[in-house]
Amino acid sequence: MLGRGQRFSFDPVAVGRSECDAWVAYYRRDWPRMLAGALGMVRHGFALGPLRNLRAAWHVMRANQAWAPYPANDPVAARQYMARFYRMAGKAGRLRVDPDAAAELELAWWRAHRAHQHDGQVSNEDLLAALVSLYCYIYQAQPDDVRRAAELRVQAMDLSDAWVAAGCQLTDPRLAQERLVLVASFTALRDVSDRQALQRQLPTSASEDRRASSPN
């Protein structure tokens, strides 16, 4: 899940499966499993190193714990924990973003999703717009570039919401669908990341080619 930072092509299959596990654990309030899912996302998405992976995953889990109660949650604490996560990713060279700004955009889509769950006036388009804003910032991309990845993640959220409404059963076949859609979403997002990395490299490569062809 890397953006404007050190080159690392994340594993969309492992990240998508880990996020599905994290969502399941979140709604079942199974925090040890939530931590395991977050750890998988960090390890396969950012590769910060064993100890930093665990610490970063801890911040993600604590953010989700602060956000989880409804309606009396703690968005300030959730934002602070996510800022710590983004700060760790930045120090490792994985992202070049302002941690507070990234955390604010992260919580914006959490807020939009919660409103979508509980308020019929909030549409999928509102949730989609919040995700697109986050992706554009993280990947320094245009909205059209990241829209497909965001659409698929919203589709996965709809499946998750239906699973929650049906009772959060681990045998529910919607979980398998959700996992597949999340993998597809992160595959689309990795394609964006790879294209952005290639575009950043092209001017340098072209300049080197011109120098190599110039007479001494």
Image (tube, grey):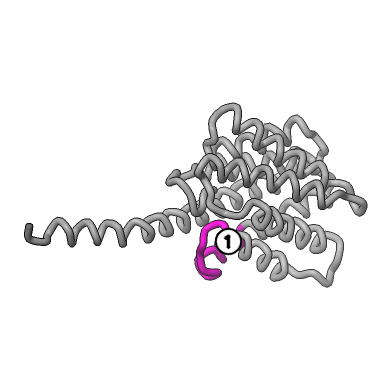
* Kind of residue at disc 1: Tyr
Total label count? 1
Going by the image, does 128 lie left or right of 201? right
Is 143 inside the magenta-drawn segment?
A: yes
The answer to whether residue 35 of the structure is visible from this angle is yes
Going by the image, does 215 lie left or right of 17? left
Q: Is residue 31 above or below residue 161?
A: above
Going by the image, does 209 lie left or right of 57? left
Foreground: 131 or 188? 131
Residue located farthest toward the right when viewing the structure as drawn: 72
Residue 40 x %, y %: 61, 35
- Residue in view at x 51 percent, y 64 percent: 141
Residue 145 x %, y %: 50, 66
Foreground: 65 or 126? 65
Q: Is most of the magenta stretch helix, strand or loop?
A: helix
Tag 1, which secondary structure? helix
The answer to whether residue 158 of the structure is visible from this angle is no
- Residue in view at x 65 percent, y 43 percent: 85
- Residue in view at x 51 percent, y 53 percent: 3
Residue 120 x %, y %: 84, 69
- Residue in view at x 73 percent, y 44 percent: 81
Q: Which residues are magenta?
A: 135-152
Is 88 inside the magenta-drawn segment?
A: no
